[in-house]
Image: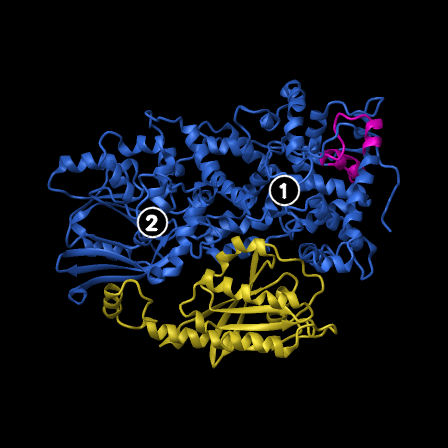
Chain colours: A blue, B yellow
């Protein structure tokens, strides 16, 4: 039977971008071939994945879906045979007479793609023509149907129908959900009482299920549709759903470049931002009262944000910034606190120090960690004078602190990148115990980056994507079209907060700025935007693809101008803040929402006019923060509003450190 | 016909943290060695033009982080690999024992057309060190059991055998490449017919 098919047109290198970034996702793009076939039954457009026949890979894809919060209990939308569904959804076959409309990609946004939409509402995933051929296919298609361009949407093409009234009616239904999966569109269209829009709002999970890889498009459509007044849920809740509940999906909504609503972003102009000189020793000392208690913490942090800290007082200031000392502690309290922390440290150090080699043979986990730390210590910043030389004793200190951190946070253990975080801190502290506790404080801010499931990283990379969608839709679309919409090329930036991207003295400056949590907790993500903004024309005018983008971003390491970048990043933050139509998700990332809980209290307040409110907030913040961060593996992704309290214990004290240098 | 095409071979280096993946890559591509390579974070690659059987080939050699938890994001880079270099440290038996899972994981994630004959090469690195703990025989035994994977003992530091190991993976990848090209040169209708009648079986290649 198949042999009777006549191939009227065929084109290779036509891809479906599934884009669900997950451990099991073997392929963000499915390669395939598109056909126009003359069959006995009629003329068909078909697309077949190269991998379609690979049963194993299909199972994996199914697993991916299972990981993203798919509930199948009692869901009416879950098909009986999910595997079949997931398999089927990637293969396309339809009679050209069933075609209702199609959407083409915006010109000059990477690979051309076509989204076919059938009369019954079935909407296929975009077919991306990596090697051209979309025009040729459409030309062939015109032999069988009449096509006209939508007067309202340059990208939309409509198939002329015999019954124009019906056409427009059904199109109205469809246009709302132009990118969503046919499977459930069909389902809901058949249910006249509900309508799929409402349906989705009522039961997003169920609905989500039916759509698999297309769900994010659907969500995005719903989110970005400006005038849907009849939402059962407020839009904000849906935003949260997308943001929180299906993190695996988060990173995935990066297909279909040039999404329309987004490309209309018009931000207010970027304000001129000034940076200042670092906080001097003299100025710093002037902040202490007679009891050694810091006055006007907010102003102090503002100064640090604006210009950093003079190297001579870094080791003092960082202890506060990293939560080793409480901001509101007296000198006396700090002295007591420090004493306890010294004991605490050596207690934990003794724990691993006293594990005998015989014991360790039956303690694989500890042994493995020891091995990893061993390897990394010998290759951490060895060109810095603090760590040069074969028999440098500072390497031992680095090692001891990392091993002790393993005991302090055994659940997390040692993960590569931690030595990068510790090294600048140790260099500043020059003291093992102080460095340990400051390191522990710094880790509280980034520990979610190192967790086993890498979810913290995935969330942040997808947050960069969300920010970029608003800040620069053009660049965003470009990156998406180059398989870079997952922003994986920013991985190193985020994992160790740009440690490898700036010179040693610059990273110290950058980190102390970030540790002020100004203008928001996620300023490091805005810095990513600023750097990418600088690289935009390079990436786009060179037409860099996935590998070239990654390479280029890796290669600009150590050549990024820090102060310019900080200025630009703050400017971008202010632009976004002033933008009237800033999506809620983005506001949330930037800490611009009115604060529902005490946790994020501090985040949203950056202007000094809010000082009073703020000190009030601080006291509220303490408790949960202590719980989340105090001891072991605080998992909260970025609630670090008042990190300063993370390590807890209000009793702190003594000013500046005495000289108990343990460095040998 | 195929020889006129520009050939790009994507080769992935895998192995436990600290076995010398970055060093091997740099030794092969840039002919240099440093004690001070940092632990790789994320992924990076270097390219090198080489002659393989009288054809000019661009090798794109990918270096990824060795720690297990970073694999979840790193697998994106396995995609489209033409060859894979599995590295262990001859002084660390556990890095040798990990080869199984590195190979398995790679085959799962990269899903090559022909996993049985996918061009792997195994490298036992750091033979310049004195405290060897994995014998060549043991390593060869493993390679043999996995379909006669070529085995090389190298020192990235002393530049011993590095060239040969990479040359081998390039050569084998090229051999596969031409098989694949042969396969995809079937006229479209024929392939289509096969696909349509037996949608659940492996492709003709």
Q: Residue B98, how many percent across, how many down?
A: 59, 65
**How many residues crowd around disc 1 within 10 Å: few (fewer than 14), some, or many (20 or more)?**
many
Location of mark 2 (residue): A82
Q: Which residues are magenta?
A: A309-337
Residue A198 appears in which quarter of the rendering? top left
| Label at residue A446 | 1
Residue A283 forms part of the magenta stretch:
no
Classified by dominant secondary structure, the portion drawn in magenta counts as helix
**Closer to us: A353 or A396:** A353
Q: Are tags 1 and 2 found on a single chain?
A: yes
- For residue A503, side relative to residue A161 (left or right): right
Give the SS element for disc 2.
Answer: helix
Give the SS element for disc 1.
Answer: helix
Q: In the figure, A210 relative to B29: above or below?
A: above
Count the numbered circles shown.
2
Q: Which image quarter holds the N terminus of chain B?
A: bottom left
């Amino acid at each position: 039977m198949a042999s009777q098919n006549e191939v009227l047109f065929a084109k290779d290198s036509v891809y479906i971008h599934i884009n669900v970034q997950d451990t099991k996702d073997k392929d963000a793009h499915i390669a395939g071939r598109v056909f126009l076939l003359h069959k006995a039954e009629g003329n068909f457009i078909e697309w077949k994945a190269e991998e379609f026949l690979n049963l194993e890979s299909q199972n994996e894809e199914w697993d991916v879906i299972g990981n993203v919060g798919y509930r199948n209990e009692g869901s009416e939308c879950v098909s009986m045979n999910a595997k079949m569904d997931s398999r089927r959804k990637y293969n396309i076959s339809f009679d050209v007479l069933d075609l209702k409309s199609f959407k083409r990609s915006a010109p000059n946004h990477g690979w051309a793609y076509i989204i076919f939409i059938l009369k019954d509402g079935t909407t296929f995933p975009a077919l991306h023509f990596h090697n051209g051929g979309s025009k040729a296919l459409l030309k062939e298609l015109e032999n069988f149907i009449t096509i006209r361009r939508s007067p309202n949407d340059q990208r939309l093409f409509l198939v002329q129908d015999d019954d124009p009234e019906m056409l427009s009616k059904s199109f109205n239904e469809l246009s709302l959900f132009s990118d969503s999966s046919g499977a459930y569109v069909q389902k809901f269209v058949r249910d006249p009482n509900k309508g799929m829009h409402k349906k989705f709002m009522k039961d997003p999970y169920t609905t989500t299920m039916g759509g698999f890889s297309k769900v994010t498009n659907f969500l995005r459509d719903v989110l970005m549709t400006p005038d849907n007044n009849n939402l059962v849920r407020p839009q904000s809740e849906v935003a949260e759903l997308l943001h929180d509940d299906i993190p695996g999906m988060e990173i995935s909504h990066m297909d279909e470049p040039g999404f329309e609503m987004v490309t209309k972003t018009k931000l207010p102009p970027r304000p001129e931002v000034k940076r200042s000189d670092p906080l001097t020793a003299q100025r710093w000392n002037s902040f202490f009262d007679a009891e050694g208690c810091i006055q006007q913490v907010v102003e102090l942090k503002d100064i640090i944000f604006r210009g950093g800290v003079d190297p001579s007082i870094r080791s003092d200031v960082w202890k506060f910034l990293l939560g080793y000392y409480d901001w509101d502690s007296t000198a006396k309290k700090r002295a007591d606190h420090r004493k306890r922390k010294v004991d605490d440290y050596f207690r934990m150090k003794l724990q691993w120090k006293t594990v005998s080699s015989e014991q360790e043979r039956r303690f694989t986990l500890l042994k493995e960690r020891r091995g990893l730390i061993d390897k990394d210590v010998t290759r951490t910043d060895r060109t810095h004078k603090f760590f040069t030389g074969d028999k440098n004793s500072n390497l031992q200190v680095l090692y001891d602190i990392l091993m002790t951190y393993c005991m302090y946070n055994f659940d997390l253990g040692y993960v590569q990148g931690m030595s990068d975080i510790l090294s600048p801190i140790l260099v500043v502290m020059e003291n093992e115990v102080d460095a340990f506790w400051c390191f522990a404080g710094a880790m509280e801010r980034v520990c979610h980056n190192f967790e086993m499931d890498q979810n913290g990283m995935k969330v942040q990379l997808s947050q960069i994507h969300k920010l970029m969608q608003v800040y620069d839709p053009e660049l965003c679309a470009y990156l998406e079209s180059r398989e870079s919409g997952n922003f994986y090329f920013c991985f190193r930036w985020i994992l160790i907060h740009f440690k490898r991207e700036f010179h040693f003295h610059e990273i110290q400056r950058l980190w102390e700025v970030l540790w002020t949590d100004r203008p928001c907790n996620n300023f490091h993500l805005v810095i990513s935007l600023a750097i990418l903004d600088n690289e935009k024309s390079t990436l786009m005018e060179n037409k860099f693809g996935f590998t070239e983008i990654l390479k280029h971003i890796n290669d600009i390491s150590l050549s990024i101008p820090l102060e310019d970048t900080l200025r630009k990043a703050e400017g971008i933050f202010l632009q976004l803040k002033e933008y009237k139509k800033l999506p809620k998700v983005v506001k949330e990332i930037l800490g611009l929402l009115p604060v529902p809980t005490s946790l994020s209290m501090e985040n949203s307040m950056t202007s000094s006019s809010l000082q009073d409110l703020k000190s009030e907030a601080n006291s509220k913040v303490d408790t949960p923060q202590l719980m989340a961060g105090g001891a072991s593996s605080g998992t909260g992704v970025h609630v670090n509003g008042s990190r300063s309290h993370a390590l807890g214990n209000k009793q702190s004290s003594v000013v500046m450190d005495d000289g108990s240098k343990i460095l040998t | 016909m195929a020889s006129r095409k520009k050939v790009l071979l994507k080769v992935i280096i895998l192995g436990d943290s600290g076995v010398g993946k970055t060093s091997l890559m740099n030794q092969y591509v840039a002919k240099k060695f440093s004690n001070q390579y940092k632990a790789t974070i994320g992924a990076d690659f270097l390219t090198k033009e080489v002659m393989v059987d009288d054809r000019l080939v661009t090798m794109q050699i990918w270096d990824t982080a060795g720690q297990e938890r970073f694999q979840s994001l790193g697998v994106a880079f396995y995609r489209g690999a033409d060859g894979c270099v599995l590295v262990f440290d001859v002084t660390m038996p556990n890095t040798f024992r990990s080869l199984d899972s590195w190979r398995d994981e790679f085959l799962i994630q990269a899903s090559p057309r022909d996993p049985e004959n996918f061009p792997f090469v195994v490298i036992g690195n750091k033979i310049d060190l004195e405290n060897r703990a994995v014998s060549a025989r043991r390593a060869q035994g493993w390679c043999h059991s996995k379909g006669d994977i070529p085995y090389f003992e190298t020192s990235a530091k002393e530049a011993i055998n590095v060239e040969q190991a990479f040359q081998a993976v390039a050569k084998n990848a090229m051999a596969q490449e031409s098989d694949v090209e042969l396969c995809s040169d079937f006229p479209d209708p024929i392939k289509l017919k096969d696909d349509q009648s037996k949608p659940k079986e492996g492709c003709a290649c």
